[in-house]
Structures are given as C-alpha cells and as structure tokens.
Amino acid sequence: MMARVAVFFRAAALWALLLALFPSPRASSAHAGETLVFALCYHSFLGSARYAGDVSPAELAGQLDELSSRGFRFVTLSDIDAGRLRGTRNVLVTIDDGNASVYDAYFSVFRPRGIRPLLCIYPGVIGRKSYSLTWERLARLVQDGCEVASHGYYHLGLTSALFEEDRQAFEHEIFGSRKKLEERLGVRVRSFAYPSGVHSPQARRLLAEAGYSYAFTILWGPVRLPGDLDGSRLTLPRYMIYRGNWPVVLGAVSKRASSASAQPAASQTPGGR
Ligand SMILES: [Zn+2]
C-alpha cells in the first residue's frame, strides 16, 4: 500500500514538473478567453490606524507596483466604453468618498504611474468638512484626467425602506448628486458607486432612468466584458481594500485572472460582442 502511495506521489510530482516546464497552449493564450476588469475600491491614504479602510501612500504604491509586476495594467471607464480592452489583467482603481488625502496620493503615487482613478464623490461633504477634498482640488484632479462617479449626495444607503420613507431624499442621491457634480466640475457623470455598497430594485431602476451607464457595488468579482455590460452594468463588482486584506485581494485577483486566461475562446458567453 505504502509503495503504491509513493508511486502516486512520484507520478504527481513529475506531472507538476512537466506542467511547470511546458505550460499548456491554452494557459498562455491570455487573449483567447474573457476580457476581465478588476475594480479596486480604496478610501483614504492617511497612513492612519484609526480607519480600517485606510492605507498609507507607501502601502498603496507597493500594491500598485505588485499588480504591475504581475502583468496587470491600469484602465479607465473610457477604455471600457471604447471597447479597447483585451485580456484578463485590467485593473480599474476607484476611490470612494473624496477624502482630502486623495489629492497628495494622486500626485505622489497615481500620476507618476500613469494611473487615472475613478473618484466616487458625494457632494454633501466636498468643501464642507476638513477631511474632504475642496471643489478646487477636485477640479484639479479632474483636469488631470481623473473621472468622477456619483457616490450619492449625502452617502445615504439606497434601500427600499428609504425609497418608501423619503422618496425625495432617495432621488436626490441619484439625480441631485450628478447635477451638482456636473455643474461644479463641468464634466459628464455617468457612473455611480452605491454608498456602503447598498442597492435595491428602486435604486437600479432610477439609475437606469437617470441614464447612468455603470454602477458599482462592493461584492467581489471581476467585471466581465462585454457580458456584464448587458445585464449587470448597474451591479458591477469591486474589491474593497482594507488595511491588511491586500494579500487576500491580490491572491483572489491573480487567481481569477490566471484561470480565465486559461479558458478557450469557445467558453465565452454565446452571442457576446
Ligand atoms: Zn462611501
């Protein structure tokens, strides 16, 4: 019995060695299968232990460089719109809430790497709280090529209960936020990030009515192109980054990107564009 087990392990080890030396043609053809975009969700870059969602600028730089070294490239919503993305190693950086620290992090970390994050902003705090960006600084980031998404007006959870209790407040989160952002920044806002990731059928219906093209949750998973642009464009997944969860996020993203690149083209969604 022991001898048979030993033979099995020797055979398995040999097989693993052969796979490592001669990867299958499918595994190396990254463009044959799905196109994937991994949206990351950051919050602030203060280097403060007080906030779970905070990472220091040095940690941020390390994370982005780790992605680059694994062959990931950084993309924007405009790249998705243009249909020019291929492969499984695309990353969209999103930053929620408009924390004041985003300004310095942009110029010291993102910009030198050619990364234009999607800034998910709720106007209720901009220029009004010491921890938030000012309108002037936000406009400067937009001038430099950062895209802006609405993140509600006052960051209210868009639940069915809120819709029933205060329809006006609910609608203001969707319509009012975009109006304010567009007026103050002179850009078109066509994407939304659900505050706290909370959404409801009413929220999705009104976002569609308002003409938003994309809305992001905080459920993990890749955005699959073009399939998700048909049925799921208002519930797109994101990976939220907390202090300490980077190894888990990086592992999950890398594994998904590798397994998708191993899929043959025939496994694409039928009828997918
Ligand atoms: Zn938020």
Image (cartoon, rainbow, N blue to C red):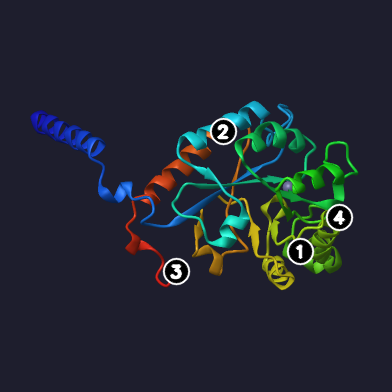
Position above or below: 259 against 8:
below
Position above or below: 203 against 71:
below
Specify which label sits upstream in the sequence, 3 or 1.
1
The residue that label 4 is drawn on is 184
Specify which label sits upstream in the sequence, 4 or 2.
2
Position above or below: 212 against 249:
below
The residue type indicated by label 3 comes to Gly
The quadrant of the picture occupied by the N terminus is: top left
The residue type indicated by label 1 comes to Ala
Instruction: Verify CB contact (< 8 Å) between mark 2 and mark 1.
Output: no
Circle 3 crowding by C-alpha within 10 Å: few under 14, some 14–19, many from 20: few
Mark 3–mark 1 distance (CA, rounded to whole Å): 36 Å
Circle 2 crowding by C-alpha within 10 Å: few under 14, some 14–19, many from 20: some
Specify which label sits upstream in the sequence, 4 or 1.
1
Q: Is residue 153 left or right of residue 52?
A: right
The residue that label 1 is drawn on is 161
Specify which label sits upstream in the sequence, 3 or 2.
2
